[in-house]
Image: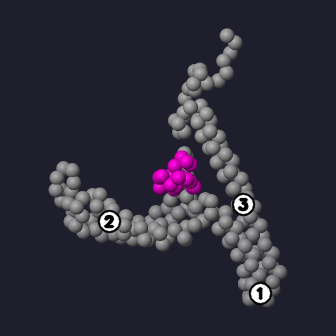
Amino acid sequence: RPRAASAASAAIGRLEVSELRIKIDYKPKRVDYARALRGESVGQLVNLCAWEGVELHLPRQLVRDAAGWAEAAEAVAEGWWPHVTAQLPNNISAVQPLAPLAHIGEGARQMVLGPLRQYQREKRVLRGLRQGTAAFVRALALETLSLSAQAAMHSAQLLEHADAVLAGQAPGQGNGPRPGGAGGGRRGPG
C-alpha cells in the first residue's frame, strides 16, 4: 500500500497493476499538420491517422519502492513498452493509412493460396481460383469505397481548417463571428 511521505508526494512500497486487455478506436478530430510533420509533437504524429481496432494485451506489472506516483507510473509504462512495440506489427491493419494495403494483401493471398489449397484437397484448381479471385475483387472494391469515403472526410477537414485560417481564427476555435460583420457574410444594401 502507498505510504504518504508528505502532502505533495507519496512513497510507494508496492504497487501491483493487473493485466489489461485494451481495444483502441481513435479517430482524431483536429490535427495540426505543421507541428506533426515538423516532429514537434508526438501527440500530433499519433493524430495523423485513425487507429481502429488496435488490441493490446498488457501483462501484470509489479513496482516496488517507488519515490512517488510519477516514478511508479513511469516504471509501469517502461514495463509495458516492450509489449506494446511487440504487438504493433500484429495491429498494422488498424492504422488507417495501412489498413487498405493489409486488406488487399489478404485478398491477394487468398487469390494465390486458394487454388493451391483446392488442388491439395480435391485436385481441382478452377474452383479455388474463382473463390480466390472473388475474395480479391471484393477486398479491392471495399477498400476503394472506404478510401473514397476517407478522402471526402479529410478533404472536408482540410477545407474547414483553411476556412478557419482565412477567417483569421486559430484552427479548432469553432465557427464564431468573423471579422467584418456579425455573421461574416455579405452585407446588404446600405
- Percent from the top left, x then y, of residue 102? 65, 68
Q: Position of residue 147 (x, y in %)?
A: 69, 56
Q: Identify the residue under disc 2.
A: 75
Disc 2 crowd rating (10 Å Cα; few below 14, some 14-19, many 20+) is: some
Q: Residue furthest front?
A: 38
Sequence-wise, which precedes: disc 1 or disc 3? 1
- Secondary structure category for the residue under label 2: helix
Q: Amino acid at mark 2?
A: Ala
Identity of the residue drawn at 51% across and 65% down: 55
Q: Earlier in the sequence, mark 3 or mark 2?
A: 2
Q: Foreground: 51 or 53?
A: 51
The extreme right residue here reads 126
Q: Which mark is residue 119?
A: 1
The magenta segment is 32-50
- Location of residue 76 with respect to 152 vertically, above or below: below
Counting from the top left corner in percent of width and height, residue 101 is at 67, 66
> Is the residue marked by circle 3 packed among few (<14), some (14-19), or many (20+) residues within 10 Å?
some
- Per the image, the residue denoted by label 3 is 142
Most extreme residue toward the left, as rendered? 5
Q: Secondary structure at mark 1?
A: helix
Kindly identify the amino acid type of the residue bearing the numbered disc 3: Leu
